[in-house]
Amino acid sequence: MDLEASLAVHLAGLGAKHDLKNWLAAERDEITISCLNGASVVEFLRHVVRCEGYSDELFGFAAGESGKSKYRNMPWWDYSIWLPIELDRPGNLEDDPTVFVGSCVALLRELHHLQEISQVQLGIAPEGYGKMRAEIQKFYQSGDTFQLTDEACVRWIWLALRDGAELGIKRNTVLCAEPD
């Protein structure tokens, strides 16, 4: 079964009203946001886990996949899709448990809650983020290298998820995270 059909079945099972064809039809180049790389996302998830009071022993994926984290819409899986609607039960596709389906609306709520409890200044753009947001193609093609601290990576990923979720809602499209 292809991804679109799997999503349709998943949403029907949840009783969620959807406009899947329009959500998937959006022009991707206009809404692409860089999450740098997998290691940056992992650092962000470590921060999430620490903010919840867990040690690194119950690191990110175990907390997210087990349902122990209250931040159910974070990118715990390599393939994550957030829909531009409220979704009561985020979770994995039945026929492809490696794909997570969540809600942009709930992701925003969780990100703002995390911002309130984090010791990191979430919401402040690290070096290079503004350039990436201004023109993603130039950012990718520039070949610029910059070193970000772990804290700057956490802030970058938080902003990328927030900006992505806001764009998903505004443009009525899905937010997708795929491995680099």
Image (cartoon, rainbow, N blue to C red):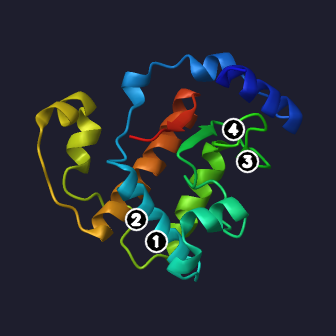
Which sits in the foreground, 27 or 10?
10
Q: Tag 4: residue type?
A: Ile
Left or right for 141, reference 18: left
C-alpha separation, residue under disc 2 versus residue under disc 3: 22 Å
Q: Are marks 2 and 4 in contact (CB under 8 Å)?
A: no
Quadrant for the N terminus in the image: top right
Which of the pair 14/119 is nearer the observer?
A: 14
Mark nearer the N terminus (2 vs 4): 2
Disc 1 and disc 3 in contact, CB within 8 angstroms = no
- Residue 91: numbered disc: 3
Q: Give the amino acid at mark 1.
A: His
User: How far separated are the C-alphas under marks 4 and 1?
Assistant: 26 Å
Q: Residues within 10 Å of mark 1 (few under 14, many from 20)?
A: many
Q: Which residue is mark 4?
A: 85
The residue lying at 42 percent from left, 56 percent from top is: 41
Q: Nearer the N terminus, badge 1 or badge 3?
A: 1
**Residue 43, labelled with which disc?**
2
| Alpha-carbon span between mark 4 and mark 3 | 14 Å
Which residue bears the numbered disc 1?
Answer: 47
